[in-house]
Amino acid sequence: MNEPYIRLTNVGKRYETKDGPVEACSDINLDIKQSEFVAIVGPSGCGKTTIMKMVAGLQPYTSGSITVGGKRVESPQTDVGIVFQEAIMLDWRDVLENVMLQIDIRKMDRSKYEAVARDLLKATGLSGFEKKKPYELSGGMRQRVSICRALVHGPTMLLMDEPFGALDALTREQISMDIQRLWMETRKTALHITHSIPEAVLLADRVVVMGPRPGRIVEIIDIDLPRPRRLDRLPERFHEYSTRIRDIFKSKGVLAMD
Amino acid sequence: MGVLRKLTPVVGTLCFLLAWQLIVVVFKMPPYLLPGPVAVAYAFVDNLDILLSNGWVTVYEMVAGYALAVGVAIPLAIAITSSQRFNEFVMPTMLFFQIVPKVAIAPLFLVWFGVGATPKILVAFLISFFPIVIDAAVGLRSMSTEMADLAKSMGSSRWQVFAQFRLPTSLPYLFSGLKVAATLAIAGTVVGEFVGADKGLGYLLLVTNSNMETALMFATIVALTIIGLVSYYLVELLEGALIPWHVTHRIRESGTM
Ligand SMILES: Nc1ncnc2c1ncn2[C@@H]1O[C@H](COP(=O)(O)OP(=O)(O)OP(=O)(O)O)[C@@H](O)[C@H]1O
Ligand SMILES: [Mg+2]
């Protein structure tokens, strides 16, 4: 069990475009243990989405190797729940059915998982909205639905690509707390991508700090703060971690973040 | 305020009809040149049996041609979006049939199939076929990469990707093609009837034209317009029932349109 669940070794990605090759990231070495929450924070275009897609098997890597659960990633991973930057909602299904999509596609037992879906919706403050259509919800509610959908089938791994990118600050804070609570209950192996330093420090066991293009890991910082972490009672060390990460970005010439 | 607003189009139509009637009366237009709306209305009511019996023929040909177009176009759109190779294979032929003027092919159909319903159905088919294929194909290709990634991460089979994601995503596009095609189908049928027919509204247009029965000719045009409008709104009704999430409907519900 001490084997890392996700292992990236010297991973690099080069996109071939008509203006020539684009080096999205290189020399990525990162081990993520089972049940660990890792956040990647870095400036726009440093290859964060690319790393997530490679781990999910949705983009091939061009060098190095990635293993998940000891197996080399060569095709789309399915023991996974993914939350994208924009909530991908199927407008023709209501809220509950958008969560149950995961169960339908996998041909899992609907009668058993409908209760799970309802519990998740309740835990994210969406009870009473089960029969609403996605276009009747706010952006924050839609993103909560997609978090429920990423968890309903009980995947081993949870991947989130800037899930709050399109949301206002208040909604972000609320959903951050939802995610922390759900993660503490389920202990999924989680990879959370963000460009917000406080969000990374708040949620993660370890924060991976990436430098500007071509994306490389600059530092990996252990966040040793007790959970549940609360936004209204942030310890002094929280600010120390944030300042440290901000200083790394400053030294790398990345303009003021957040 | 709200009621007045709703009546605006009705008032506009009435003004147009009134102006038309005035012009006819004031300038003493001979009825074989330009009958007034009142005369057209009388011609419509007096000849209702003729209009109905010929109208059914046209409706039948139009619906048959349209149904054939839908039945061929949708599977073809699915095929060309599933296989790039097949797309390249059929595109030149399809483009040829789109660009060649249908009016020019219609006499050929007459030679091949006689004066019956078949040539009209075929012209209606040809003219309404292309917009359905194109819009359905655009729709079937419109799924975002994120949605495709989501589908893959769930382990969707090819069939599931199609049935659960791709096909529903394509419906708003498909319906815009179906609506355009519905109005084109009636035009295609009339073209078919112009070329050679012994019944139908297109035939009635030619007869009334050569007999200088201009009021009945106008009444025939009105009948054709009604058929076109009804078929358009039937498709739109179906669209509203099948894809209530579609943006244009959402906008309408909130009262902007
Ligand atoms: N499909 C693609 N084809 C070509 N180049 C790509 C593609 N996807 C990403 N890139 C390039 O790779 C680099 C990294 O992109 P990526 O989307 O991973 O960045 P990111 O860190 O997620 O940025 P952001 O914070 O803005 O989302 C960028 O320079 C981008 O232009
Ligand atoms: Mg990104």
Image: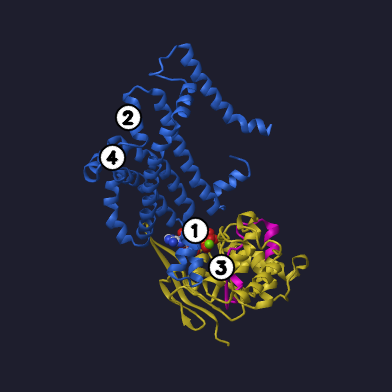
Chain colours: A yellow, B blue
Q: Amino acid at mark 1?
A: Pro
Q: Residues within 10 Å of mark 1 (few under 14, many from 20)?
A: some
Instruction: Give the Cα separation between the discs numbered 2 and 1.
Output: 44 Å
Query: How much space separates mark 4 and mark 1, taking CA atoms?
Result: 33 Å
Give amino acid for label 3: Leu
Marks 3/4: CA–CA distance: 47 Å
Q: Which residue is mark 3?
A: A101
Label 4 secondary element: loop
**Residue located beneath label 1 in the image:** B168
B9 or A217: which is nearer to us?
B9
Give the magenta range.
A150-175
Q: Position of residue B242 (x, y in %)?
A: 53, 54
* In this view, the mark in front (3 or 4): 4
Task: Tell me which corner region of the image, top left, top right, bottom left or bottom right, holds residue B137.
Answer: bottom left
Lower sequence index among marks 2 and 4: 4
Looking at the image, which residue is at 63% across and 68% down? A148
Residue B83: % across, % down: 34, 62
Depth order, front residue of B70/B162: B70
Left or right placement of residue B226 versus residue B33 in this view: right
Residue position marked by numbered label 4 in the rendering = B101
> In the visual, does B25 lie left or right of B133?
right
Q: Dot 2 surroundings within 10 Å: few (below 14), some, or many (20 or more)?
A: some
Which chain does the numbered disc 3 sit on? A
Q: Amino acid at mark 2?
A: Leu
Which residue has dot 2 on it? B206
The quadrant in which the C terminus of chain A is found is: bottom right
The secondary structure type at the circle numbered 3 is helix
Horizontal side of residue B93 vs B218, given as left or right: left
The disc, 2 or 1, on the residue closer to the chain's N-terminal end is 1
* Residue B18: x %, y % from top left: 53, 20
